[in-house]
Image: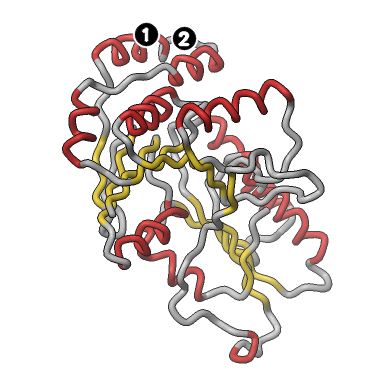
Amino acid sequence: MKFLFVASGIHNNQISWLKTLKEKGHKVEYWTWKKGESKAGIKRRSIESSSFSQISSSFFKKLKNRRIRRVANVFTFPKRSFYREMREFNPDVVVARDPYAKLFSFLTLFYARTQGKKTIIYTQSPLHRKVGLFKKIFISLSIKILKAKWITPVMGDKKYPKFHHNAFFVPLSIDLHGRKTAENNKKKEINIISVGVLGKKRKNNLLLIKALNVLREELDFHLTLVGSFSHKKQERVRELQGIKEFIKNEKLEDKIIIKTNIPYEEMFKEYKKNDLFVLP
């Protein structure tokens, strides 16, 4: 079968999905809004925006209001050649990320349905959660119009029902190729690794460090924070600087190391150096 994934950018946590599909004999391509290199042998193609979208995007980027800029990004369209290229690739299954947040994702799935293709909506919204009436109607209409299944790697709180009967939990995974076990790790110090975008508040890097700081008298630990980082995003620069200042003020420099922008292929080595993975 042919699988086409469409999203703003290719995410490292999806690569095991893609590689497994390829290993099983399926053809996989990943088309992204953002430019970038192919990863782990997965063919990646950049989607070009239409002339109108380029003009409107350059205009809205000059505005200081971030909300307006974010709304403008939702209404970004690809060139008409995008749909011709989809026809030529002729996928059996199209998986698109966040169609309610990116109009081009919704249009991709809608076009795929008109061509008789199977469609899958991919988000990171919790499967079990409380959903308001408006959002419930919106989700139901989206699934009905697109005749889609919905997948998410986030289980959520099971005290709530699934947000839709056609939504399913599909966990993200990684093959560690001979991981450590408790039996072959006899040392007292515990090595902890946490992976996520550095300086992004919802990744809670500082929360993890504060928790470990509380435990430092009873736990001999070493923490490695690994994540992508860009100096272009000032709010993340400030957040990371605050994290570094906390580490320095609490005299944790010998217990915590921060590593940025490690290539995907090198991450296996980082995982294998550690005993515990924490996602705060």
Q: In x, y percent, where is residue 80? A: 22, 21
Identify residue for label 2: 63
The scheme the figure's colours follow is secondary structure
Look at 66% across and 51% down and name the residue there: 155
Residue 61 falls left or right of residue 278: left
Q: In x, y percent, where is residue 39? A: 30, 54
- What amino acid does circle 1 point to? Phe
Residue 48 falls left or right of residue 88: right
- 219, 119: nearer the viewer: 119
- Is residue 111 positioned above or below 119 on the image? above
- Counting the numbered discs, the total is 2
In the rendering, which numbered label is found on residue 59? 1
Look at 46% across and 52% down and name the residue there: 260
- 237, 134: nearer the viewer: 134
- Is residue 265 positioned above or below 198 on the image? below
- The image quadrant of residue 201 is top right
User: Does residue 254 show up?
Assistant: no
Residue furthest toward the front? 116
Q: In x, y percent, where is residue 99? A: 47, 30
- What amino acid does circle 2 point to? Leu
- 22, 210: nearer the viewer: 22
Q: In x, y percent, where is residue 172? A: 52, 57
* In contact (CB < 8 Å): disc 1 and disc 2: yes
